[in-house]
Image: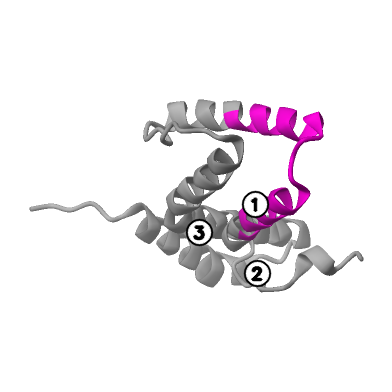
Amino acid sequence: MHESPRPDDLLAGVSRFLAEQVAPKIDDRAIAFRLKVALFLLATVRSELHLGDGHAHAEWARFSDMLGYTDALPSDPAERRDAFTKLNRELTDYIRSGTADETEMRQVMMASLRDKLAVVQPRFDARLDCENQGK
């Protein structure tokens, strides 16, 4: 039985090829920089493949609880995008209303921020107490 490589394996192979075979041969600094950006984007997509679904469910649960939603997160990608768009609109209205509990809002937002940072900057220490940095 023929099995296709997983998307993560394909992305890892492309990343290795670019980093190990192509990058050393590039003398043009502008192209080398663009290659680094491309490698960063490939790493971000790989992280999103690993973490994205779990983070989406966690974020949905956090904001749904805060806003009193009872709907489950749709599994269809287009429906999921639409549901998050609606949820974000309602969250914006909730914040603007002035009735949001600041402590709860901060905790929910920080948890979502940590999830997003885990995707785009996996080496970032999410345990840092970012909330108290500007006080």
CA separation, marks 3 and 1? 21 Å
Q: Where is 89 relative to 27, above or below?
A: above
Secondary structure under the numbered disc 3 in the rendered image = helix
Circle 3 or circle 1, nearest the eye: 1
Which residue in the protein does label 1 denote?
108
Which residue does the image show at 46% across and 47% down from the upper left? 57
CA separation, marks 1 and 2? 14 Å
Which residue does the image show at 55% across and 65% down from the upper left? 22
Q: Where is 103 relative to 82, above or below?
A: below
Inspect the magenta stretch and tell me whether residue 64 lies in it.
no
Nearer to the camera, 39 or 114: 114
Nearer to the camera, 13 or 122: 122
Q: Where is 129 relative to 69, above or below?
A: below
* The C terminus lies in quadrant: bottom right
Q: Earlier in the sequence, mark 3 or mark 1?
A: 3
Q: From the viewer's perspective, is 25 left or right of 56?
A: right
Indicate which disc residue 16 carries.
Answer: none
Nearer to the camera, 103 or 56: 103
Amino acid marked by disc 3: Ser
Which residue in the protein does label 3 denote?
47
The picture places residue 32, in percent across and down from the top left corner, at 70, 62
Quadrant of the rendered image containing residue 132: bottom right
Amino acid marked by disc 2: Ala
**Most prominent secondary structure in the magenta stretch?**
helix
The picture places residue 118, in percent across and down from the top left corner, at 59, 62
Quadrant of the rendered image containing residue 14: bottom left
Q: State the extent of the magenta-drawn residues as a range.
A: 87-114
Please tell me how crowded label 2 is: few (under 14), some (14-19), or many (20+) other residues with Cα within 10 Å. some
The picture places residue 68, in percent across and down from the top left corner, at 55, 35
The picture places residue 90, in percent across and down from the top left corner, at 65, 28
Which residue in the protein does label 2 denote?
126
Circle 2 or circle 3, nearest the eye: 2
